[in-house]
Amino acid sequence: MKITHVTTRVLDTLDETPLVAGLPEPGEHTGPRQLLTVELGTDQGLVGLGVTFWHGALAPALKVALDVLAERTLGEDPRAVEAIASKLRGATGRTSVNGSGIFHLALAAIDTACWDLKAKLADQSLCAFLGSARQRVPAYASGALLRGFSLDALQRAADALVRMGFGQLKMQCGSEATPAASIDRVRAVREAIGPGVDLMWRANTAPACGRFAICSRRGVLTS
């Protein structure tokens, strides 16, 4: 099996917070949201799909990176995932080896598309091909408890998510001025959802994330 053609697309999504209507409030999370897709077509008629994203001003740069790297997969066997990744790293110089964000975001979409093709060739879903151990998994709510929101907005969103049936939530922290401010945000969400809902915390590469509070499944811890 060989890759014979590639297609990349930019998908504009609605400028709103997922899951909870009426958000976001004005802040760092306003603005267009875009998803980038890559389709790797093969000589056997199968097409593998991969997705990546980088919201904001650098999204066009990621699109260029995805276009350039996807074109370099032409003629390759998509089942040779590691060989393709090695080829793409070699084509971009040392920067990619040292962790260039745009490179790895683009590579992630291509890697996913290759694995999607391997699964389709085996006539399986990708999760089954990778060795899924269960038929159902619990869903957690992500993307509605953002660091740009006020405490009131966080509590309203968290309460809405619980009423929708989610038993696990994930929130953002890490950009606050002090550890205490991060703890206050986590505490506000915990108060809104009660003790019986799992709460996860993510800094999303915030510069000060190493100094700030983290939350456990049932409470709050500080680093």
Image (tube, rainbow, N blue to C red):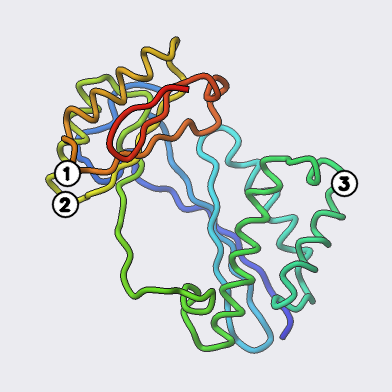
Q: In the image, is residue 161 above or below residue 190?
A: below
CB within 8 Å, label 1 to label 2: yes
Q: CA distance from mark 1 to mark 3?
A: 47 Å
Question: Which residue is located at x 86 percent, y 54 percent?
Answer: 91
**Residue shown at the point (30%, 44%) measured from the top left:** 18
Residue at the spot of label 3: 93
Label 2 packing within 10 angstroms: few (<14), some (14-19), many (20+): few
Callout 3: SS: loop
Quadrant of the snapshot with the N terminus: bottom right
**Residue nearest the observer in this picture, 219 or 30:** 219
Mark sitting earlier along the chain (1/3) = 3
Q: Amino acid at mark 1?
A: Val
In the image, residue 38 above or below residue 187: below
Seen in the picture, residue 82 relative to 54 is either above or below; the reply is below
**Element marked by disc 2:** loop
Residue 138 or residue 175, whichever sits in front: 138
Q: Which disc number belongs to residue 10?
A: none
Q: Mark 2 highlights which residue?
A: 165
Question: CB under 8 Å between callouts 3 and 2?
Answer: no
Task: Give the residue pinned by disc 1.
Answer: 162
Dots 1, 3 in contact, CB < 8 A: no
- Identify the residue at image location x=79%, y=40%: 98
Q: Tell me which numbered mark, 3 or 2, is placed earlier along the sequence.
A: 3
Foreground: disc 3 or disc 2: 2
- CA distance for labels 3 and 2: 47 Å
Q: Residue at x 49, y 84 (%)?
A: 124
